Amino acid sequence: MKSKVFGKLSLMVVLMVLSQLVYAQSREKRDVSGFDALSVSDAFVVEISVGSTESLEIEADDEYMDDIITEVRGGTLRIEMKDSRRNRRMKDSPRAYLTVKSLDRISASGAVHIKTFDILKANRFTVDLSGASVINLELDIEDFSFEASGACVVSIEGSAKEQRVKISGSTVYRAYDFETEVAVIGVSGASSASVYASDKLDVRASGASSIRYRGDAQVNSNTSGASSVRKGQ
């Protein structure tokens, strides 16, 4: 009886060890330079820091490391899988630890998660999202342009003189802590936006969308369907 129990325990230990070996992760440094824009697809988690030297380190399951493409083309750093179907079989999403000197554009598609750990500074900054991407940014800029479709979730902090936002699908745009003087917001579908504007707020909302705002801006709104525009708490 004891030998059977011991045998089962031994088998469990072996299976646990094998599972860890199968899904063993490693880190690999990639040579990148000369970019001011970022494009990410599939299901990567990207952590962005600001530094004096550009660098990129990828963390992923060993067997998938060679399938991860990181290349700079036309000033844009692209991070993606050779075959997006292989991404779905990973135990954990691959991670990219990115250090930038400057950045003024981010585009993401799929189920990408992007987070900044430092304030990104630029005159103009553009973000374009689709799919089910999640992004958390802290910005200190002059002009901000944002567009998203699908089921994206967005959190923005910091400040800008003007923000122009266009969202559709069921996107959630949270920017109460992103203080701007002027905000131009277009929302459709079942999306929602919470924004801050101190001087002027132009809103166009349709479908079942909702917009909440803070600040003392003069509001000009055009709504249709079951959409709503209200002062936030």
Image (cartoon, grey):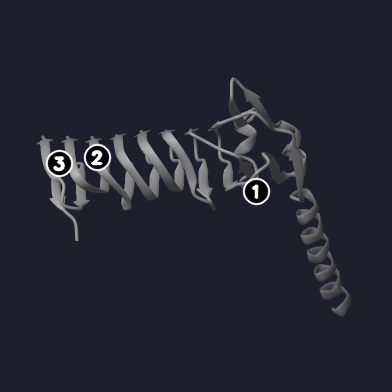
Q: Position of residue 64 (x, y in %)?
A: 72, 38
Q: Are marks 2 and 1 in contact (CB under 8 Å)?
A: no
Q: Amino acid at mark 2?
A: Ala
Q: Secondary structure at mark 3?
A: loop
The Cα atoms of the two marked residues, 1 and 3, are separated by: 40 Å
Q: Is residue 157 left or right of residue 53?
A: left
Q: Position of residue 153 (x, y in %)?
A: 39, 46
* 163 versus 7 height, above or below: above
Q: Amino acid at mark 3?
A: Ser
**Residue indicated by mark 2:** 183
Q: Is residue 57 left or right of residue 151?
A: right
Point out the residue furthest to the right here.
3
Numbered tag placed on residue 117 in the rendering: none
Q: Residue at x 18, y 44 (%)?
A: 199
Residue 87 position by quadrant: top right
Q: Who is closer to the viewer here, 201 or 94? A: 201
Q: Are marks 2 and 3 in contact (CB under 8 Å)?
A: no
Give the class, few, some or many, for how many residues have Cα within 10 Å of label 3's Cα (few <14, many ≥20): many
Point out the residue furthest to the bottom here.
2
Point out the residue furthest to the top here.
74
The Cα atoms of the two marked residues, 2 and 1, are separated by: 41 Å
Q: Residue at x 48, y 34 (%)?
A: 104
Q: Who is closer to the viewer here, 191 or 159? A: 159
User: Which tag, 2 or 1, sits closer to the chain's start?
Assistant: 1
Q: Secondary structure at mark 1?
A: loop
Q: Is residue 7 left or right of residue 217?
A: right
Q: Amino acid at mark 1?
A: Lys
Q: Residue at x 70, y 43 (%)?
A: 57
Q: Who is closer to the viewer here, 98 or 129? A: 98
**Residue indicated by mark 3:** 227
